Amino acid sequence: MDAAAANPASTSLEAVATAFRSRVNELQDLALARNMYPATAVTDLAAVDASVTAMEAQVQAIRRRLQEELDAIPKAKKLVEKSLKQQQKLQHMLANMPSGMREDVVATPLEQSSARMLPECFSFNTPAEFLDSDFKIKDEPVAAPKKGKGAAPRWYISTGELDSLSSYMRGRLTLEKVNIAINEMATYADANAHLVACPKKKLSEDTWERALELRDIAATEAAKGKHFFLEADIKGPGLKLDHTGKSILTVLRHLGRIHETRIGHHRVFILAKQR
């Protein structure tokens, strides 16, 4: 398909401009025919020519503006598609978020104990600050989640997904229990990511040893650029290494929410992003 067929509006403007030029030539010929002395018609012809030149300039400006709008359409379509996809993710999260997990009860015992363990380099006044903070590394660059990845994914499961499991695998698990566990796992992963990114000067000696260990894990091919937590991080209250907790981990592996691997002597769980 040629350019003219692809941009019919642009072609129409070109036709208008051509018609203007043709009309100018006709007016010049008529003026000369009515006056056998061309020198006396120069002023009138110059005025006509100036007016038409100005009109042609306006047509060209309209063409440029129209072309800019046509070029922006594909970008706008992509933006709309991304916005709709993000809307679907948010609607899924809202529909399946555990009823007890609201802003007024975000500070669970897990997060309170985590706050006591975390150094001052990632002390946050509100949960929003914790979720929106960047993983910036100033002193020692390492393979932490790249800037722009944001907080760890909280890909909650739906009632349909839970019901699709066999009764043996599902057991006595409820949607509430599983999604609370997903939120806790994301909290573990967020804490690890901040610990990896925190400069040495803001860490205690004991915490620095753990940070180095986490950095080694973050640098591996399996965990590079991803959010992860260790089996040793699981301490409840919503997810524990008891029978229920192990069942939850099995279900989440089956549903593709987490991937499990072994790095060194650690059992590492990597959080999957919502598709």
Image (spheres, helix red, strand yellow):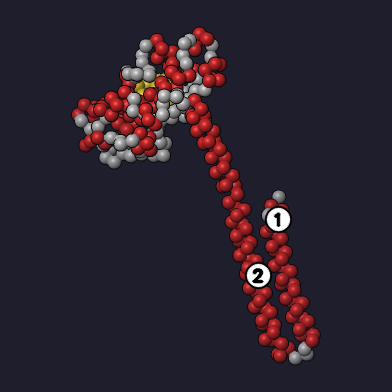
Q: Do the residues labelled 1 and 2 touch (CB within 8 Å)?
A: no
Residue 100: quadrant of the picture: top left
Residue at the extreme left: 205
Q: Pinpoint residue 240: horizontal percent, then vertical percent.
A: 36, 15
Residue displayed at 40% across by 10% down: 243
Task: Specify whether residue 216 is in view.
Answer: no
Query: Badge 1, how many Cα within 10 Å: few under 14, some, many 20+?
Result: few
Task: Specify whether residue 201 is in view.
Answer: yes
Left or right relative to 168: residue 71 = right
Residue pointed to by mark 1: 8
Left or right relative to 178: residue 33 = right
Label 2: which secondary element: helix
Residue 101 lies, with reference to residue 86, above or below; the image says above
Left or right relative to 40: residue 183 = left
Q: Pinpoint residue 265: horizontal percent, then vertical percent.
A: 32, 18
Q: The residue under label 1 is which amino acid type? A: Pro
Residue 138 lies, with reference to residue 58, above or below; the image says above
Residue pointed to by mark 2: 56
Residue displayed at 57% across by 40% down: 81
Q: Pinpoint residue 119: horizontal percent, then vertical percent.
A: 25, 32
Residue at the extreme top: 168
Residue displayed at 50% across by 8% down: 168
Q: The residue under label 2 is which amino acid type? A: Glu
Mark sitting earlier along the chain (1/2): 1
Residue at the extreme front: 104
Nearer the observer, 30 or 174: 174
